[in-house]
Image: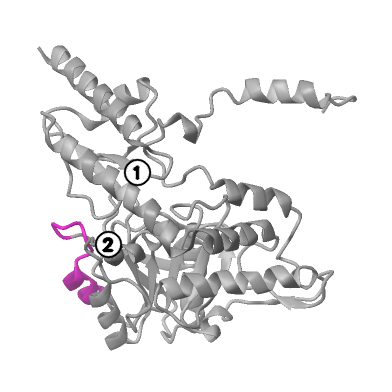
């Protein structure tokens, strides 16, 4: 730190120069991210109320009430009339909170407590296991890339305290057989958490749009909690995740009381102490402004581009889809060339794509438009031509 600070103009110039390597969502080249540029309204609301800390709820009682409205609106979207929960930093915190809650209410007397998750589950469950002293048992997938239900049943022991299902997997957007997992949870009296961090803002609109609509909501009685992330398809600012619980009792299982807060003694039911009230207000504003119709329009456009890209990939020699898209996520693979080589060459052409062991993931977010996809297809064909030449 220098003795004398920079002027605002000098600082702005230096910062712009230092950030030149960062890729902007407006470039249209970010095809591998599950986040997007926030809606302009969310940006405006967030910056206007950026000082609000809902971690000291007594100081921002109005913001606390609007958080309850956010939870009520999202719970209603997921078929729960009176839901409970919190706006948190993101899916990782929400998933950790869910397993923390499951451990808190666990009836298992075993010193080793286990949670059964699909092999496709997000790495945040491994973090949760490490932090909470839980053994995470990953279950193989079927040919449809969903969790194998028979193997789930066989994995349940007296040590099992929870099951996890995913509604929109990180790698391919697959939805597990949530109804069947709900039935299993009910039979065995187990906590069932659904990670719908991505799919939670997509799947609820499918029925009205005429798309196949997998079951995953609180309408299924075995579900205890759901993760849903407004800062993904909800177009909210980062950080904006949500944990939704079926009952108030579950929502308050992990809520130690803090006595020294400026606004008075209060319970803390999230992992972080300081929480952004501005994020809460931005999510609330978007839900009120866009409504179901607005989000339905966004989802329709993203899905139309997804289906169009899927057809394009099917027509290109030497690459193929891993599976037909379920939501706005595609996996591209090849039986001819190394998918790593394809990915590296695409990245050399400035495409920000996600690379998994056997496929490239493309996510059609609101910042992606048909012209971006047309450019991507042209570059993909060039990359394949380059690899064919190298192979000769």
Graded by Cα atoms within 10 Å as few (under 14), some (14 to 19) or many (20 or more), the crowding at tag 2 reads many
- In-image side of 3 versus 151 (left or right): right
Q: Earlier in the sequence, mark 2 or mark 1?
A: 2
Rendered residue at 38%/54% (across/down): 297
**Mark 2 → mark 1, Cα distance in angstroms:** 17 Å
Answer with left or right where residue 132 lies relative to residue 382. Answer: right
Residue 344 sits in which quadrant?
top left
> In percent of the image, x 52 and y 62: which residue is there?
287
Q: Is residue 358 visible?
A: no
Q: Are marks 2 and 1 in contact (CB under 8 Å)?
A: no
Q: State the SS at label 1.
A: loop
Residue 208 pos. (x, y %): 30, 65
Quadrant occupied by the C terminus: top left
Q: How many marks?
A: 2
Rate crowding at label 1 as few (under 14), some (14 to 19) or many (20 or more) other CA atoms within 10 Å: many
Where residue 358 appears, x then y in whole percent?
Answer: 23, 40
299 with respect to 264 (left or right): left
Q: Residue at x 14, y 17 (%)?
A: 388
- Judged left or right of residue 283, residue 332 is left
Task: Give whichever of 30, 141 is nearer the camera.
Answer: 30
Q: Which residues are magenta?
A: 142-155
Indicate the quadrant containing the N terminus: top left, top right, bottom left or bottom right.
Answer: top right
- Residue 257 or residue 369, whichever sits in front: 369
From the top left corner, tell me how far across and down residue 381 is, in percent: 20, 23
**Which labelled disc corresponds to residue 256?**
none
Quarter of the image where one finds residue 118: bottom left
In the depicted structure, whether residue 359 falls above or below residue 388: below
Residue extending farthest right:
3
Q: Which residue lies under the disc numbered 1?
A: 364
Q: Which residue is mark 2?
A: 175
Q: Is 113 within the magenta?
A: no
């Amino acid at each position: 730190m220098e003795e004398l600070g920079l002027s605002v103009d000098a600082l702005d110039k230096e910062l712009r120069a230092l950030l030149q390597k960062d890729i902007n969502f407006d470039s249209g080249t970010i095809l591998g991210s599950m986040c997007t540029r926030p809606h302009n309204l969310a940006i405006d609301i967030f910056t206007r109320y950026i000082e609000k800390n809902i971690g000291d709820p007594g100081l921002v009682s109005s913001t606390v009430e609007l958080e309850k409205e956010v939870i009520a609106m999202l719970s209603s979207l997921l078929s729960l009339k009176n839901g409970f929960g919190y706006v948190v930093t993101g899916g990782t915190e929400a998933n950790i909170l869910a397993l923390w809650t499951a451990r808190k209410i666990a009836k298992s007397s075993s010193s080793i407590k286990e949670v059964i998750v699909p092999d496709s589950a997000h790495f945040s469950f491994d973090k949760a296991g490490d932090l909470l002293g839980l053994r995470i048992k990953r279950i193989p997938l079927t040919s449809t890339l969903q969790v194998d239900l028979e193997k789930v049943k066989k994995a349940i022991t007296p040590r099992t305290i929870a099951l996890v299902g995913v509604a929109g997997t990180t790698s391919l957007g697959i939805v597990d057989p949530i109804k069947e997992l709900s039935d299993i949870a009910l039979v065995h009296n187990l906590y069932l958490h659904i990670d719908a961090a991505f799919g939670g803002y997509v799947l609820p609109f499918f029925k009205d749009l005429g798309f196949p609509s997998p079951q995953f909501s609180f309408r299924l009685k075995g579900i205890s909690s759901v993760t849903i992330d407004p800062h993904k398809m909800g177009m909210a600012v980062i950080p904006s995740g949500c944990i939704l619980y079926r009952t108030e009792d579950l929502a308050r299982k992990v809520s130690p009381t803090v006595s020294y807060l400026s606004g008075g003694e209060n319970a803390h039911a999230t992992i972080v102490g300081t929480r952004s009230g501005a994020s809460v207000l931005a999510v609330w504003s978007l839900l009120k402004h866009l409504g179901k119709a607005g989000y339905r329009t966004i989802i329709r456009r993203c899905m139309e581009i997804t289906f169009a890209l899927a057809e394009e990939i099917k027509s290109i020699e030497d690459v193929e889809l891993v599976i037909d898209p379920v939501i706005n996520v595609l996996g591209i693979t090849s039986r001819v060339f190394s998918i790593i080589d394809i990915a590296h060459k695409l990245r050399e052409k400035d495409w920000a794509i996600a690379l998994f062991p056997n496929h490239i993931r493309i996510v059609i977010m609101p910042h992606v438009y048909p012209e971006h996809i047309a450019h991507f297809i042209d570059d993909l064909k060039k990359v394949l031509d380059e690899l064919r030449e190298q192979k000769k």
